[in-house]
Image (cartoon, rainbow, N blue to C red):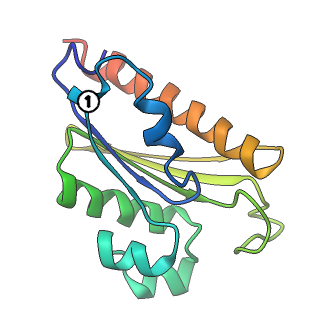
Amino acid sequence: MLKDKGLTVAFAESCTAGMLASEFTKGTGSSDVLVGSLVVYQPEAKKKLLGVKQDTLELYTAESQQVTNEMVMGLKKTLNADISIATTGLAGPGGSENSEKPVGTMFVSILYDGRAEEFREVFKGNSQQIRKDLTDYIFQKLKGIVEEHYDR
């Protein structure tokens, strides 16, 4: 669908750790569409590669919508794909989880055609299942955006 419309995509991946790019490249024609994917697992990588601000990390934590929003803006500047997608979240214990943000909480920001969309979902299961469910969720959102906004 993306190839047919002449669109490109790029990913900034934290919790998915490359799974988005890996799964995406299983599709025919992905080399014409995928600009690249940055795995920015540690906060320092988010800052250096995507320009996430230290203040944002300290105020909201690395696993937050605010950080994901800064990630997607940095990704757009860095790789300039038609559609930029950033994600971070809590696939396992040991991060910034709390009663309002339990393990399984995932944040996604999608920037395209001068628009930005934010998503927050909570997935259940072990780390691998959460990451897989998030990847599928992002691909569903991507498909919906392309169908809704690029079918002209």
Number of marks in the image? 1
Name the residue rendered at 74%, 53% in the picture.
Answer: 104
Seen in the image, is 95 located left or right of residue 87?
right
Name the residue rendered at 37%, 63% in the picture.
Answer: 71
- Image position, residue 137 (x, y; %): 58, 33
Seen in the image, is 119 located left or right of residue 134?
left
- Image position, residue 92 (x, y; %): 76, 61
Above or below, 121 against 28 in this view is: below
Above or below, 57 against 81 in this view is: below
- Image position, residue 15 (x, y; %): 59, 57
The quadrant in which residue 12 appears is bottom left
The quadrant in which residue 2 appears is top left
Amino acid type assigned to the residue bearing label 1 in the image: Ser
- Image position, residue 98 (x, y; %): 80, 71
Seen in the image, is 61 located left or right of residue 37?
right
The image quadrant where one finds the C terminus is: top left
Foreground: 87 or 31? 31
Name the residue rendered at 65%, 45% in the picture.
Answer: 131
Foreground: 53 or 26? 26
- Identify residue for label 1: 31
Q: Provide the secondary structure element on which disc 1 rests.
A: helix
Q: Residues within 10 Å of mark 1 (few under 14, many from 20)?
A: some
Seen in the image, is 18 located left or right of residue 47?
right
The quadrant in which residue 73 appears is bottom left
